[in-house]
Image (cartoon, rainbow, N blue to C red):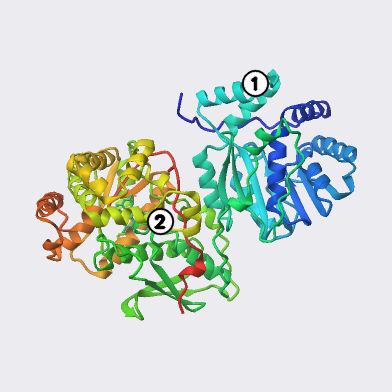
């Protein structure tokens, strides 16, 4: 009842002219508030003049309103239904604005416009009609100017209980037909998680997800040259309070400052974009790239970025560089481009270089044909939810274990009793993690509580991505000051927190354990490659993954003789961790990844812009 069911698309029907007229009557009667709210948003996110595009215009109310209130705007309004367009034209004529609206029959997924044509592209309550809305978003991104406004809004798919509640409450005045329309649209819409995922895949620079009231979600980007004086629409006063729920204010959008564009070719930019989609400890993004030429890129890390106890001798950051190299390789392999990564560990001007990617482009003007958004690189994520068993076949497990046979890392998939052993050692490592003041404070530095923070920093972890739930988030917030956490620790809270971690492990289908025969930077690097290769493969078959890094990362320190880095109590726990690994036959564990079946995460970690990673 509380679970959001899968999407149920509405059957595609082309309405007759009579039906469209009836539909238009319903729109006029019932959707004024939504339209006023969105229209005021569109107008204030956009410049005062220019070319606007209304995707899926229906009977044209938004375009007509826009043309009425913005005398210097010309609107292209597209729809697939000729009958809709006919009624839309009539509506424009009635308002005397038909000479500034060009109505066109067109498929929204293949818009008949050149790249970067429009000052503003908007799309209202249309995405839920499409089986794969990513096509549409990518098309909108293509035809919008690079610094133009983009506004896409649609309903949120809800659980059956919420859906009934919404239809009966917000559709109180609707007639039966409209109620049915409303309910069917909610069923076909995207859930909040799917919307976030879609926004991430579309990867529209500077765009952010917002919510309107409890019914709608949007993807919004204000134009760089948007109007400076706010235009409030003359909404009838009895509708104004409700309309306000549907107005987004561009001023609330904390835009990251636009970086000066460096001159790099689109293909190198794509490659680096792919690389930085890799995982990194607490999403700190330690990568740096030195583009030596079109054919040679040095992969480096900045050791000042991750100063946590986890990152002993930069092993976590080196691991992240390995993962970034793997992402680049994945993309190059997809297009059969020859390349080689030459590992060459060196310290250079305060940075650590791991090696050079040498690319043999098939042609001087070669461009990637692969859409990054469609690859596992963009879909991969850390999922901290509880998992369900996926019941992978032995053959599939064998395939996964063999994926990295060319690299000097041992891959083992642990299930059953061995999974229980991992759960136990993860428990002890987690006791240490939650009881250390430095790790507690470090975690809090990387949590992003507010949307503005997420978009301003573009690093760290959105609180929702931690999947702590309402109570967990309240606990995290309350225990942020160390003295408060310490008081809770005295009450024995670390056992409960570590027990949660144990349960997360036990809920999984299995654990992938990566290990080597020694600890060296090269092995950390290769472990990063292997982890990412497996993670991408698991993403491709729809499985969720979470690194359980505390135990192996502590072990690196421990094996290197740094016993005194741990208190006497924690040394006792470390012996348990060590014994656990020994029982599993893993002398030099490098990483543990749990995997299984799970819903999409509640939020995703963002990345900084490519330019931020470039060094001379
Ligand atoms: C070396 C390393 C250690 C990590 N350890 C953990 C961990 O112990 N628990 C966890 O939930 N995520 C862990 N992560 C995942 C990162 O937090 C995650 O990759 C980052 O926040 C970016 O999010 P994304 O993977 O969803 O893109 C680790 C990642 C790396 C590279």
Q: In this view, does 519 lie to the left or right of 222?
A: left
Vertical placement of residue 67 versus 26, above or below: below
| For the residues bearing labels 1 and 2, Cβ distance under 8 angstroms | no
Give the image location of residue 268, x and y in percent. Answer: 52, 70
Q: Mark 2 points at which residue?
A: 460
Along the line of sight, which residue is nearer the eye, 401 or 259?
A: 259
Q: Quadrant of ligand 1?
A: bottom left
Give the image location of residue 175, x and y in percent. Answer: 70, 19
Q: From mark 1 to mark 2, how far is it between C-alphas? A: 43 Å
Vertical placement of residue 572 versus 393, above or below: below
Residue drawn where x is 12% and y is 56% of the image:
567
Q: Residue most toward the top?
A: 176
Along the line of sight, which residue is nearer the eye, 225 or 539?
A: 225
Residue drawn where x is 45% and y is 49% of the image:
604
Q: Name the residue under label 1.
A: 172
The answer to whether the beta carbon of the residue marked 2 is less than 8 Å from any atom of ligand 1 is: yes
The answer to whether the beta carbon of the residue marked 1 is less than 8 Å from any atom of ligand 1 is: no
Residue 266 visible to an observer of this rendering: yes
Q: How crowded is mark 2: few (under 14 residues within 10 Å), some or many (20 or more)?
A: many
Q: Is mark 1 on a helix, strand or loop?
A: loop
Corner quadrant of residue 214: top right
Along the line of sight, which residue is nearer the eye, 492 or 200?
A: 492
Give the image location of residue 448, x and y in percent. Answer: 42, 52
Vertical placement of residue 180 versus 495, above or below: above
């Amino acid at each position: 009842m509380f679970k959001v069911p899968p999407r149920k698309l509405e059957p595609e029907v082309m309405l007759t002219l009579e039906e469209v007229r009836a539909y238009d009557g319903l729109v006029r009667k019932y959707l004024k508030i939504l339209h006023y709210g969105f229209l005021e948003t569109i107008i204030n996110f956009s410049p005062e003049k220019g070319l606007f595009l209304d995707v899926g215009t229906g009977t044209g109310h938004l375009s007509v309103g826009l043309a009425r209130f913005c005398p210097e705007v010309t609107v292209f309004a597209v729809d697939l239904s000729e009958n809709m367009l006919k009624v839309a034209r009539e509506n424009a004529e009635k308002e005397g604005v038909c000479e500034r609206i060009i109505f066109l029959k067109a498929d929204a997924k293949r818009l008949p416009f050149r790249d970067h044509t429009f000052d503003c592209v908007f799309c209202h309550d249309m995405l839920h009609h499409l089986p794969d809305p990513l096509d549409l978003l990518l098309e909108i991104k293509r035809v919008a100017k690079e610094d133009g406004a983009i506004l896409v809004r649609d309903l949120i798919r809800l659980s059956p209980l919420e859906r009934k509640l919404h239809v009966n409450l917000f559709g109180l005045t609707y007639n039966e037909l409209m109620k049915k329309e409303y309910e069917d649209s909610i069923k076909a819409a995207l859930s909040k998680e799917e919307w976030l995922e879609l926004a991430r895949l579309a990867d529209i620079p500077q765009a952010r997800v917002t919510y309107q009231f409890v019914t709608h979600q949007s993807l919004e980007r204000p134009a760089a040259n948007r109007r400076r004086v706010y235009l409030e629409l003359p909404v009838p006063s009895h509708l104004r309070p409700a309309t306000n729920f549907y107005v987004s204010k561009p001023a609330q959008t904390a835009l990251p400052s636009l970086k000066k564009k460096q001159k790099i070719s689109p293909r190198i930019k794509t490659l680096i974009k792919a690389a930085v989609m890799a995982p990194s400890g607490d999403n700190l993004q330690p990568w740096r790239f030195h583009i030596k030429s079109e054919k040679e890129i040095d992969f480096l890390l900045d050791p000042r970025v991750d100063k946590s106890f986890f990152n002993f001798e930069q092993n976590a950051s080196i691991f992240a560089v390995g993962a970034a190299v793997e992402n680049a390789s994945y993309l190059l392999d997809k297009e059969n481009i020859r390349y080689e990564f030459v590992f060459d560990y060196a310290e250079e001007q305060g940075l650590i270089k791991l090696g050079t990617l040498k690319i043999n482009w098939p042609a001087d003007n070669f461009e990637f044909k692969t859409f990054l958004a469609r690859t596992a690189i963009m879909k991969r994520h850390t999922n901290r939810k509880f998992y369900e068993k996926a019941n992978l076949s032995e053959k599939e497990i064998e395939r996964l274990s063999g994926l990295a046979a060319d690299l000097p890392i041992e891959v083992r998939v642990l299930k059953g009793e061995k999974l229980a052993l991992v759960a136990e050692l993860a428990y002890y490592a987690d006791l240490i993690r939650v009881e250390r003041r430095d790790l507690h404070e470090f975690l809090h530095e990387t949590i992003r509580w507010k949307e503005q923070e997420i978009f301003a920093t573009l690093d760290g972890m959105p609180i929702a991505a931690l999947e702590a739930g309402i109570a967990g988030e309240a606990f995290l917030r309350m225990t942020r000051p160390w003295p408060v956490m310490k008081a809770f620790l005295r009450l024995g809270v670390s056992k409960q927190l570590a027990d949660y971690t144990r349960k997360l492990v036990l809920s999984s289908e299995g654990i992938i354990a990566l290990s080597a025969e020694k600890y060296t930077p090269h092995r950390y690097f290769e472990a990063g490659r292997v982890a990412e290769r497996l993670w991408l493969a698991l993403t491709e078959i729809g499985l969720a993954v979470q690194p359980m890094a505390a135990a192996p990362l502590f072990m690196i320190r421990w094996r290197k003789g740094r016993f005194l880095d741990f208190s006497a109590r924690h040394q006792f726990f470390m012996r348990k961790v060590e014994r656990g690994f020994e029982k599993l036959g893993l002398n030099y564990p490098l990483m543990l990844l749990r995997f299984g079946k799970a819903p999409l995460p509640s939020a995703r970690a963002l990345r900084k812009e490519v330019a931020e990673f470039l060094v001379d």
